[in-house]
Amino acid sequence: MSAPALANPPALSLRPALRPADLLVERVPEAADLIEKAGLGGQVGFAVADAQTGLILETRAATEGLPPASVAKAITALYALDRLGPDHRFETQVLAGGPVTNGVLAGDLVLVGGGDPTLDTDALADLAQQLKASGLREVRGRFLVWGGAIPFAREIDAAQPAHVGYNPAISGLSLNFNRVHFEWRRQGSGYGVTMDARSERYRPEVQVARMKIVARDMPVYTYEDQGGRDSWTVAQGALGNGGARWLPVRRPALYAGEVFRTFARSHGIELPQEKEATTLPPGTVLARHQSAPLVEILQDMLKYSTNITAEMVGIAASQAKGARMANLRASAEEMSRWARTGLGMQGVRFVDHSGLGDASEVTAGAMVQALAKAAQDNRLRPILKEIRLRDENGGIARDHPISVDAKTGTLNFVSSLAGYMTTKDGTELAFAIFTADEATRAAIPMAERERPRGARGWNRRSKILQQALIERWGALYGE
């Protein structure tokens, strides 16, 4: 099977020219006309290739590096599958740091994070149940939490607003995607507020994150680290009668420890206030929880585009050969090297594993090369999300002749789509479309970065362009 040739990609298809008599082909719009109609400004780069041979069919600005946004997660998935394997499971443990005699632990109890990005409140409840079943009744030492399996980061991308839940801290001990649930209800002239670690089965309230309502209109949220606790304020003028949202957690190991301590107490095991361990203490395993297989975690990551999952599995992949990563950026650089050597992606530069940081750069040509290589053993398409194409009224098109499995990517004034499409006759194509108005994005004030003016409309036009290009390729290259 030949490798994609992308050093100097041709601008047009290398297939035999289609006959002018073909009226359908005569009606296919030119890519340049579609781009002009979209009116995006900034940059548009794309590439499309035969997925099985890697033969480049059409390109535009395919060697120009643009922010991939969450399309980066597709490369992270391939990286994790290669380094860790599809059956890899992350394990969270509870250790006894001393002998247990007649249910009494003469030593420390340690909640040990194993880098599981999917650990939730239900799993901690099950661990506490296991602890009770082990016969433990009392702890004479400390209650420690350890998240050092991967390097700690207070946030993924410092350029994001402080309160957005998709930009939490990273730790080897993470809970509920390192988010806390904030809910408010009007009660008379004031509000009732809860901060909890809710899951399908439980809603334990927490003190590691606290909220204060302040009489103001702006800013809506402020954040401060107060003595190892997340201290939030919210503008009363923004609350209305009630609502809820997920806020990021900045002290994830303590967050998980507090919730576990609550469940232990429900089983009659009183634990001391949790403290963070700087190194992993030795001990005997009393309880353990294993994640789902990695391939299932990655499929959910690609479907829901969870940033923290991408970062945690990406760092775990970087450390799979035994090298400790100093920080997230070092891990992203390791993935960049792997992408260049393992996938042939020239000119690629990642600053994280999720695509949240806009300093990452990927070319459309390099992305298509990676997709074509992954198609050789069909390791990526089965876990990509099905993208339903739209009809002329904007609704989901029924029985559209083109099927698409791909990863979307969205930042303010950045929109990307990359994956696989199957045409009406069964031809499989690999494609990547990157659009970005980086000048407009850079000018957005911090206070407006969650919902800047004009971004939603720009993104909508980009998605229309993406479908138009896909339909063009389906008409041209599907016989």
Image (tube, rainbow, N blue to C red):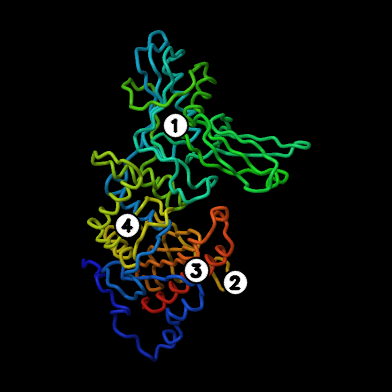
Q: Secondary structure at mark 4?
A: loop
Q: Which marked residue is nearer to the observer: mark 1 or mark 2?
A: 1
Q: Mark 1: which amino acid?
A: Ala
Write down the residue under mark 4.
349
Among all residues in the image, which is located at the extreme top?
102
Say whether disc 3 or disc 2 marks the residue closer to the N-terminus.
2
Write down the residue under mark 1.
253
Write down the residue under mark 2.
393
Q: Secondary structure at mark 3?
A: helix
Q: Which marked residue is nearer to the observer: mark 4 or mark 1?
A: 4
In the visual, does 213 lie left or right of 299? right
Q: How far apart are labels 4 and 1 at the CA level?
A: 30 Å
- Measuring from the top left, give residue 245's x and y in whole percent: 60, 44
Say whether disc 4 or disc 1 marks the residue closer to the N-terminus.
1
Place residue 277 in its image quadrant. Answer: top left
Q: Which marked residue is nearer to the observer: mark 4 or mark 3?
A: 4
In the visual, does 466 lie left or right of 381? right
Q: Secondary structure at mark 1?
A: helix
Q: Mark 3: which amino acid?
A: Ser
Q: How far apart are labels 4 and 3 at the CA level?
A: 23 Å
Say whether disc 1 or disc 2 marks the residue closer to the N-terminus.
1
